[in-house]
Image (cartoon, helix red, strand yellow):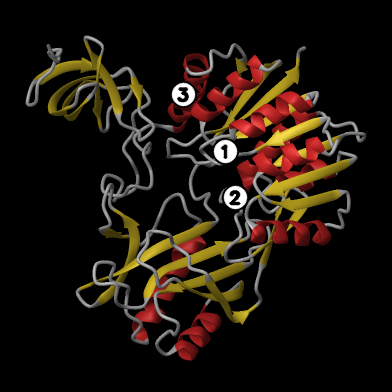
Amino acid sequence: MSRTLPVQKNDILDIVFEDLTHEGSGVAKVEGYPLFIPNGLPGEKAKVKVVKTNKNFGFGRLLELQEKSPYRVEAPCPIYKECGGCQLQHLNYEGQLLVKHKHVQDVLERIGKIDAVVHPTIGMNEPWRYRNKAQVPIGEQEGGLIGGFYQQRSHQIINMEACLIQQEENDDVVRKVKEICQKYGVKAYNEERHKGELRHIMVRRGLVTGEMMIVLITRTNEITNKNKVVDEIAAEISGLKSIIHNVNNKKTNVIMGDITNVLWGQETITDYIGDVKFAISARSFYQVNPEQTKVLYDKALEYANLQGEENVIDAYCGIGTISLFLAKKAKKVFGVEIVPQAIEDAGKNALLNDIHNVDFAVGKAEEVIPNWYKEGNTADVLVVDPPRKGCDEALLQTIIAMKPKKVVYVSCNPATLARDLRVLEDGGYKTLEVQPVDMFPQTMHVEAVAQLVLSV
């Protein structure tokens, strides 16, 4: 006999919000049954309507706030409720940092059964206008080009003149490029019909250097009136170092395609994180918030506590960002990354900084590092910075077998961090402390750095 749910569709309920989901919806429980309701904040009392029920959870709509959170604010962005880019603009910044700390702490305890100090989240002095990269989908409305963000859970473009988490200069550039493309008859890509040209406009800007790159991403190999478009963009935009054309002719949600050509200027721009210089190409992975990236890497470096005699392995090294920070303090650093272009960039960045005690290898960390171990190569300190899915089991088991004295785990997903820390603790490591860092204010995302030491 099936269990009767404590709520039914269309029920009107008085509830108290207890938590937030990873999408920023409020969580309330009725006899242990979770309801997910947009725009609710922890501690608030509200009247809600149940709109959908599943076996294990349901969804509701906020009808009336009866008691507001002291952290609630009016979202400053005019398209906040339509746009899917931010989830927390209705929560003030102090409240955001508290929510992110609680999220990391709760997940570590619940999933990983980890007993470690979780420090308060390190936030930004100015939690707006921090993104150094804009990638804006382009559409057409009443015959004119529009650009913005996709509406939540849809591919409908919300036209946007300004994004409050992007650098203002990038907003201005996107607006100008749209106008120039419109002037010269460049048509927007139509996703449903797979027709038209311009899919996205991407702008990358060096936070320290101010150097700027514009990338025009099209379905077609050619751009209408290309020379006129390029000449006018180059003439109109100051600080511009590079105009790139990327071709993506596939029916896909992936933004960039395989063909990339320089239309004007140089192939890369440069920027600094701390005193390390990076060359950034159109397809380079480079953190969108360099200011907080430095905070994150400084904490990783502090946890590694290098004395100059250590061999260090940096798994998932990307374009060498953490590797080059580590190399300044270590005897030797070995970086591994699956993306060949990233490893090529990492090598260039090492030369750019005159750093010679690093070696980079292409391949899966879970395959390359076990092979190194079989060949007798070990590490005193091992740093991992995996994607959201966390570390592969084979890599975790190699770490346990290799027994580096310290492991520094940089994470963009607290749930997989908790899971992986449990495996490492069961293998003889002890998690000493975890530091959440807010890389993406106004969103639910939180990064964290964990320090582990060998305890057996």
Q: Residues within 10 Å of mark 1 (few under 14, many from 20)?
A: few
Does 290 sit above or below residue 89? below
User: What amino acid does circle 2 point to?
Assistant: Gln
**Which residue has dot 2 on it?**
287
Does 229 sit above or below residue 39? below
Label 3 sits on a secondary structure element that is helix
Whether tag 2 and tag 3 are in contact, CB under 8 A, the answer is no
Q: Nearer the viewer, residue 180 or 357?
A: 357
Q: Residues within 10 Å of mark 3 (few under 14, many from 20)?
A: many
Report whether 286 appears left or right of 146.
right
Which quadrant holds the N terminus? top left
User: What amino acid does circle 3 point to?
Assistant: His
| Residue at the image position 50 percent from the left and 80 percent from the top | 233
Label 1 sits on a secondary structure element that is loop
Where in the figure is residue 120, as x and y percent of width and height?
A: 57, 22
Instruction: Calculate the distance from the C-alpha at mark 1 to the C-alpha at mark 3.
Output: 21 Å
| Residue at the image position 43 percent from the left and 26 percent from the top | 95
**Which residue has dot 1 on it?**
125
Instruction: Calculate the distance from the C-alpha at mark 1 to the C-alpha at mark 2.
Output: 18 Å
Where in the figure is residue 355, as x and y percent of width and height?
A: 86, 53
User: What amino acid does circle 1 point to?
Assistant: Asn
